[in-house]
Image (cartoon, rainbow, N blue to C red):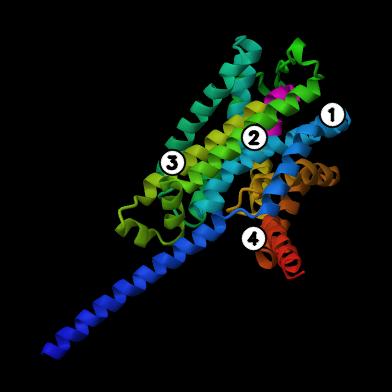
Amino acid sequence: MRHGNDGREGTGVNAVAQTGHRRLAVGRMAGDRRRVWPWQRTTLAALAVAACAAPFVLEPYRVFQLTMVLVYGIALLGLNLVVGHGGRVSLGHGAFLAIGAYIAAIMTGRLGVPYPLALPVAALVTFGLGLALGRPALRLSGPYLAVVTFVTAAVVPPVIKRFGTVTGGSMGLSVPVPSPPSWTGLAEDQWLYLLVLAVAAVAFAAARNLLESRAGRALTAVRENPAAAEILGVRPGSHRALAFGWSAMYAGVAGTLYAWVVGFVSPDSFTVTLSIVLLAAVVIGGPGSLAGPLLGGVFVTFVPAAAQRAGDAIPGIVSGLLIIVVVCFAPTGLAGLLRMAAGGVARRLGRG
């Protein structure tokens, strides 16, 4: 009898020890992920300098394209919270992009509200809408959530057309473009680029802090094992709903910037195809990484425009095919491939 008790006690001690070792290993891995090597700091500094210098060395059209890469990068940064870190599929973020764009167009174009006020209003409204949609929708799993968000993306453009007296209907709305202050001496395209770059820097810093916070770690735990996370006191529904609200807010901010940069909004700019392309961009750029949204922004800016020359439905088809290819052959996306290449170069330099 005594021997049996000792066996049980030994088993308990071993279980605790194994749990401790696992936690220690996880802590070490997390520390390794947070470690920033000197070459990484140098690379980030060089990219920051290049980003700031870009509008002064490129022609206006190229500056506009880079600006759109940043705009879509902000939207994808939010969608990445749901897809990459939350493990859910959303096909409705084009709708939140449209809502943010129309809030900016109506407030600044029709109501004459100052530009600095339109951005936080769009962020708050889209956060509230995302939270309201996320609470019931995220209780669904599998393809059902994708269907609900897909319906949302499909419904928003007709609703915009229905209230034409406010939204301009199918004709759309012209949006006054923010003019650079006279003391800056900047051209309009340079000013817009630097404005969007500043917002993108804040957005990426906020996302990084969020993911490293307790809420971000809880969201990752829910993605990895919802049952185990719930046992540890994490409420999966609440964290997923908050993540959906944050992602909608990022899309709303991106929509506001889109309206300012393009100077025009219409329902045809925010069709279901846009939501499909955004999802494809998250997967292709690299789900779960901070560099992925920027790489995805490059995809959204250049690939659909080239594919659309063959037909309006081609961008959606191309995006779907690329999702399949990336999931099968490069599940970590372009960001993962670049990370592997950089690691290989660093190891070779270390040996040398």
Q: Position of residue 343 (x, y in %)?
A: 69, 63
Query: Who comes first in sequence, dot 1 or dot 4?
Result: 1
Query: Who comes first in sequence, dot 3 or dot 4?
Result: 3
**131 horizontally vs 189: left or right:** left
Looking at the rendered structure, the kind of residue marked 2 is Ala
Q: Which residue occupies 49% across, 50% down?
A: 145
Q: Residues within 10 Å of mark 3 (few under 14, many from 20)?
A: many
Residue at which label 3 appears: 242
Q: Real-space Cα distance between discs 2 and 1?
A: 19 Å
In contact (CB < 8 Å): disc 2 and disc 1:
no
| Bounds of the magenta segment | 258-270
Foreground residue, 129 or 283?
A: 283
User: Can residue 228 be found in the magenta stretch?
Assistant: no
Looking at the rendered structure, the kind of residue marked 4 is Thr
Residue 117 visible within the image: yes
Q: Real-space Cα distance between discs 3 and 1?
A: 39 Å
Query: Who comes first in sequence, dot 3 or dot 2?
Result: 2
Q: Nearer the viewer, mark 1 or mark 4?
A: 1
Residue at which label 2 appears: 200
In contact (CB < 8 Å): disc 2 and disc 4:
no
Q: Which residue occupies 62% across, 38% down?
A: 75
Q: Position of residue 173 (x, y in %)?
A: 69, 19
Element assignment for label 1: helix
Magenta span main SS: helix
Looking at the rendered structure, the kind of residue marked 1 is Phe
- Tell me the number on the disc at residue 332: 4
Foreground residue, 298 or 46?
A: 46
